[in-house]
Amino acid sequence: MALKTAAMAGLSGSMALEFGGRVSKDAGMSAMDMPSFSGCRLQAKGSKMPAPLTVKATQGVRSSMTADVPSAWPGRAVLEDVKTRSGPKPISLIGSTGSIGTQTLDIVAENPDRFKIVALAAGSNVTLLAEQIRAFKPSLVSVKDSSSVSALKEALAGMDKLPEIMCGDEGIVEVARHPEAVTVVTGIVGCAGLKPTVAAIEAGKDIALANKETLIAGGPYVLPLAKKHGIKILPADSEHSAIFQCIQGLPEGGLRRIILTASGGAFRDWPVEKLKDVKVADALKHPNWSMGRKITVDSATLMNKGLEVIEAHYLFGAEYDDIEIVVHPQSIIHSMVETQVHHT
């Protein structure tokens, strides 16, 4: 048995943006040397040691996918050779003012020779969006509604060349299928991400997926559609990006099991009798991360980890029995894979 570990080093989004080349330090990925684990669960310092991991005698991770619902990366990832590009890769970003969106823009700003922003979609945070427009100069922008359009134009007063500004569902779909974009980053929260993702796939754009609801709600539709159009769905959030990095180069049947870690959320140390007094403000106090309100609440209730299991099922073709959740309060490791014997 061999365990491979990966942690988010702030560049998981870079991998999704840059897909098409092998992962290496030259390709902009930093590798974090992580300890190997054998026969025990991750635990908090001073906590009681739980039972050892049970290794199943399987011949590789079992897939419950049918021919009609192919997984994005069925237990392994074989990268293409490095592609030569004459200029920066054009990116459309959906959810630019959120946590994923701002991190994506940080990566773009640090690598102007590799990436450029051609379109942005955001909600109603026009102040931050205006700053992003001035910094990245997209040709198309979409906001939540017509009132946000007026506010954005006011915030952009004095700018030499304004982008085209749209709003609502129509606007976000146009951002997703912008003719110049090669990859679309979907950092929007909830099922609102499904429609633009489908539009991007139908327009031939690769997807850097940080919107888990796209697969949770629409996996049986989205995955065959991506296969039909020859589109890559690349995991951009930390847990699934780490898995994706771990399975690169694995031979057929080399993946035994997927392990997702969970911080335990805001209430992990609360006694049961205290939970009846929980307030929204309590749920929004994540012990480790600063994230959007919905995902922070979902982390507190542990719902988010359940959603990530479903996402891993669709991305990597693993049966639910082959996906395990381990509470790891330090959040150093975001996910791991267990490989077959001699696979490292």
Image (tube, grey):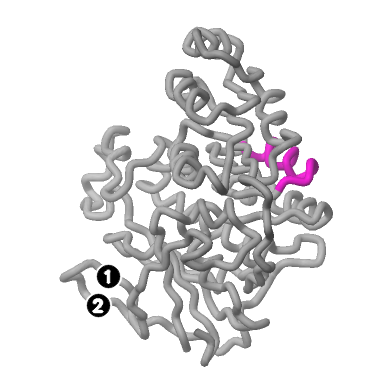
Query: Where does residue 248 sit, x and y in percent of width and height?
Result: 58, 73
Numbered tag placed on residue 161 in the rendering: none
Q: Is-magenta flag for residue 200?
A: yes
Query: Where does residue 215 sit, x and y in percent of width and height?
Result: 64, 51
Query: Measuring 60% from the left and 49% from the top, which residue is drawn there?
Result: 208
Q: Nearer the viewer, residue 269 or 195?
A: 195
* Tag 1: amino acid: Gln
In the displayed orientation, state which residue is furthest to the right. Answer: 228
CB within 8 Å, label 1 to label 2: yes
Number of marks in picture: 2
In the displayed orientation, state which residue is furthest to the left. Answer: 46
* Tag 2: amino acid: Met
Query: Where does residue 5 sit, x and y in percent of width and height?
Result: 42, 72
Which of pointers 1 and 2 lies earlier in the amino acid sequence?
Answer: 1
Specify few, some or many for label 1: CA neighbours under 10 Å numbering under 14, 14-19, or 20 or more: some
Q: Nearer the viewer, residue 39 or 337?
A: 337
Q: Which region of the structure is painted magenta?
A: 193-205
Q: Which residue is mark 1?
A: 43
Q: Nearer the viewer, residue 310 or 78?
A: 78
Tell me the distance, in whole angstroms, between the alpha carbons under discs 1 and 2: 7 Å
Q: From this viewpoint, is residue 166 visible?
A: no
Q: Is-magenta flag for residue 298?
A: no
Query: Measuring 48% from the left and 56% from the top, which residue is drawn there?
Result: 12
SS for dot 1: loop
Query: Where does residue 11 sit, x and y in percent of width and height?
Result: 45, 55
In the displayed orientation, state which residue is furthest to the bottom. Answer: 342
Kindly report the secondary structure that dominates the magenta region of the rendered protein: helix
Query: Measuring 67% from the left and 53% from the top, which residue is drawn there?
Result: 85
Q: Which residue is mark 2?
A: 49
SS for dot 2: loop
Rendered image quadrant of residue 75: bottom right
Rendered image quadrant of residue 50: bottom left
